[in-house]
Amino acid sequence: MDAKSFYGARQRTLLALVPEHPEDSDADLSDNDDLIEDPDYHPTPAEVAGDSPFESLEEEAPSTSSSTTQPPLKKSRKGKSTLKTVSLEETGDTPDPSSLFTDEMIKHIGHHTNLYSAQELGDPIKTSPEEIQDFLAILLFMGVFTFPSLEDYWHYDSRFDVIADIMPKKRFQLLRRYIHFNDNHQWNQSPDRFYKIRPLFNMLREQCLLIPSTYKHSVDEVMVAYKGTRAGSLCQYIANKPDEWGFKMFCRASSSGIIHDLLMYQGASTFFNVVLSEQEQTLLLGAKVVTTLCKTIAQPRLSVVFCDNYFTSFNLVRDLHTLLGVKCIVTVRPNRIGGAPLMTDKELMKRGRGACDYMSADGVVAVKWFDNKCVNLLSNACGIMPFSAVKRWSKESKAKIAVPCPSLIPAYNEHMGGIDLSDMLVHLYKTPAKSRRWYFPLFGYILDLCIAKSWLVYKRDCGLLNEKPLCLKRFRLAVAHSLIKVNNSPPPENQKYTPRPSRPKPQPDVRYDNMGNWPLHSEKRGRCNLCPKGVSRNERNAMFSCVCLQTRNALHFCIVL
């Protein structure tokens, strides 16, 4: 390649990408997990020696400067799309949101709950799918109306009728104690460390893959909060996360926040049920995760994947396009850019805010841009042209100024936050999942994730119909009420639960003051509402008092004279 063709390669844009409102984009791309190292990453000998396709290009054009001169700023035109989005009509019918947590999952929970209780107690607790639906409804209500402890929903001082009228406290505690999702006797030394919850996750993943997505996907990690010690090394720690301790999962989501695929991290056996080629087995952890999640993309050659510097490298971006046809726009760490001879951070900072340097090789452009700090990006989906302007605060002029910005920066900021949006929605109304059983928080996350995703699909459909959607809280409450009313058949007579009105006990100073607590005498004969039915007068006289005395309720005596 001569110097002229190399210069043309540097100026050629792979795909023009202009933000609709570049001034609104946040170009501070510094990641909170910069200090989190990939446990499998080690620099290759080529990276240590500095051998790279970028360097070979530079040797063929020694007279060409490796930095760029700032091109004139171009005003963005309103209405110009950034990346082509998928039409929902082209991808097929949208599945029913209620199918995320399917009837099959409810029957599965009921079956294994009865099985586990029979193994532990010798006799099953005889639950049913209808009762499991009531149990799920209670958990949904508890996520909105939070009390200090679960017993407070039934306690006479703080009774919450919306929950207490669905199921007795002892029955709820019994279901919560023996709820189960897999058969412990079928474990047989399986390498799956999430064996107790795996069937439910597999069914959830199948439903996630059925939801049509756009062409833009983001890959990131999610933490499910758990600080117990019973899960062993499954419990991970990641600093600067909302939940620093918990179970780690890797997810692929669209920019709207809908998760389409997920993978649970369990150390060396994470990919025990994933078919990998010999080349893929040699990849690092981050590259394996991205490759595995990208394999389930419906239309890979039309899709663009965004991920942060924890996962990415130059070889990953190149191989994803070669093997799967997926293009990428990613941030990358300086030691993983494939040895591109970009300017150093000090040299770029001397050029001022908005300075940019880039190199191109093998269809991949490496960009270093200085805003508040230097950030490195790799892209084979778009180039740096045309430049746009973003508004930034200047301490010197004490006003907002226009900062030149390559086109791939606003695209990354716009489409990278899908998983963070989903995580935020899940944390708004969380199912109380504090338990000695380590897998119960994962069950609570599945329930909350289904609600959040269903609401996003419902909100998207309301936008297509020009209707005003419910907020997430009202939507969650509507689902809970629907679960209660979905079973119209009356329960068996022996399982019928009639909620009692709240009768708070008097305070001790009133109960034992010996004043005003005696029964009222009346000529009209009546029957005590608290006495058991079918008890004759002689039997009550022999008992001398009714059950009310046994409960030590000083406000009522039922003595038959």
Image (spheres, rainbow, N blue to C red):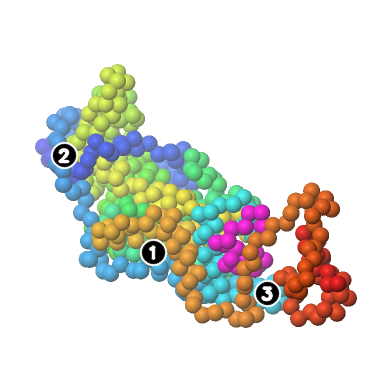
Give the quarter of the figure containing the C terminus.
bottom right
Q: Nearer the viewer, residue 92 or 456?
A: 456
Q: Which residue is mark 3?
A: 119
Residue farthest to the top, as pictured: 396
SS at mark 2 in the image: loop
Check disc 3 and give the amino acid type.
Answer: Gln
Relative to 376, does residue 415 appear above or below in the rendering?
A: below
Residue 231: name its quadrant: bottom right
Give coordinates of residue 502: x percent, y percent. Answer: 65, 61
SS at mark 1 in the image: helix
Q: Which residue is mark 2?
A: 76
Q: Is residue 228 left or right of residue 6?
A: right
Are there few (<14), some (14-19), or many (20+) residues within 10 Å of tag 2?
some
Give coordinates of residue 265: x percent, y percent. Answer: 49, 55
Q: Which residues are magenta?
A: 155-173
Check disc 1 and give the amino acid type.
Answer: Cys
Residue 443 located within the stretch drawn in magenta: no
Q: Nearer the viewer, residue 405 or 316?
A: 405
Q: Which residue is mark 1?
A: 208
Give coordinates of residue 509: x percent, y percent. Answer: 79, 48
